[in-house]
Amino acid sequence: MDALRGFALLGILMVNITYLASAYHGTGLEDPGLGGPLSEVVRRLVTVLFEAKFFLLFSFLFGYSFTLQIDSAERRGDRFAPRFLRRLTGLFVIGVIHAVILFPGDILTLYAVLGLILLALRRVRPLNAVRIALALLAVTAVGYALLALAVADAGGGGVIPTSTASAAAQATEALRGGPASVIGAHLQELPDVVALLLFFQAPSALAAFLLGLAAGRRRAFADTGRHQRLLRRLQWVGFTAGLLGGIVYADASLNHPESAYQLLAMGLDVITAPLLAAAFAATVLRLAHGR
């Protein structure tokens, strides 16, 4: 668990550090201060291998740890719900502070809100949890496909507003200022970040919560030696389909921003990103199990 959690945090850092390094990241525009072959290679590798993948692994572990907390409360004879609600409250407060002071792309506040849904579903059977998770991912992917069709029917999009470049330049200057300037820039970004969290990350994160809940109920990590065959299958399927989906997602995000193709690629990534995350996790578990 600790090895996987540390690995997931490393992957999240690889993504978030690109947003910390440039206010242009995520706008579809290249930062004027960054350029050259090395920067381009790094952008593509991070987008293919890390972006939208590792928060899923971290979310899965959140759901798995949830079952361990339930067991711990039962052994102590404590009421679980009040304890978990206190933790969610603390998580939300930490997330708000983090979003305002350090990095607006915070996911802890989202975890705190989705944790309430997880708490309500804590008695769901493992198989039903998996079914709900797969349905969430499927509905989200279909939603992106329908949105892509609507954008294509309206003209295809693919045009970045001229105001985007000026807003990114202003944010860059603000982030070079003092604490008040930095906090002001973060607050200005928050509405867009909240929309991104709700529509892009929330459904997938909740699905990963439920998959983690199901795995925790089955005590999947209690003896990974029993699951070596399954882990190998996850590697084959995950790295094949996941990398292909990641390549399409990167091409659409970096070369065709604001287009119907990008929306379609985001829908594809909703399906393939969990497979790549599972392949990464299977690799770590196999390495941890061996010498």
Image (cartoon, helix red, strand yellow):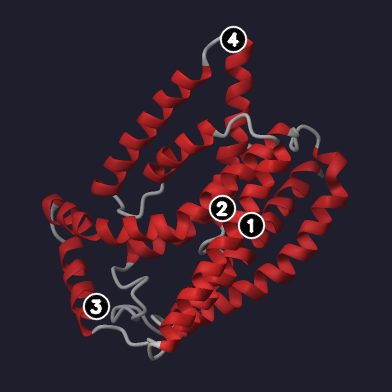
Q: Is residue 190 visible?
A: yes
Circles 2 and 3, Cβ within 8 Å, touching? The answer is no
Where, by quadrant of the figure, is residue 213 drawn? top right
Q: Earlier in the sequence, mark 2 or mark 3?
A: 2
Residue 291 seen in the current view? no
Q: Nearer the viewer, residue 179 or 272?
A: 272
Looking at the picture, which amino acid does disc 1 mark?
Ala
Q: Is residue 192 above or below residue 220?
A: below
Residue that label 4 marks: 76
Q: Secondary structure at mark 1?
A: helix
Cα distance, mark 2 to mark 4? 30 Å
Tell me if residue 170 comes above or below residue 218 in the rendering.
below
Q: Is residue 182 left or right of residue 159?
A: left
Q: Which amino acid, by three-letter code, is at mark 4?
A: Arg
Q: Which residue is mark 1?
A: 277
- Residue on which the image places disc 3: 164
Whether label 3 touches label 4, CB < 8 Å: no
The residue sitting at 74% across, 33% down in the picture is 219
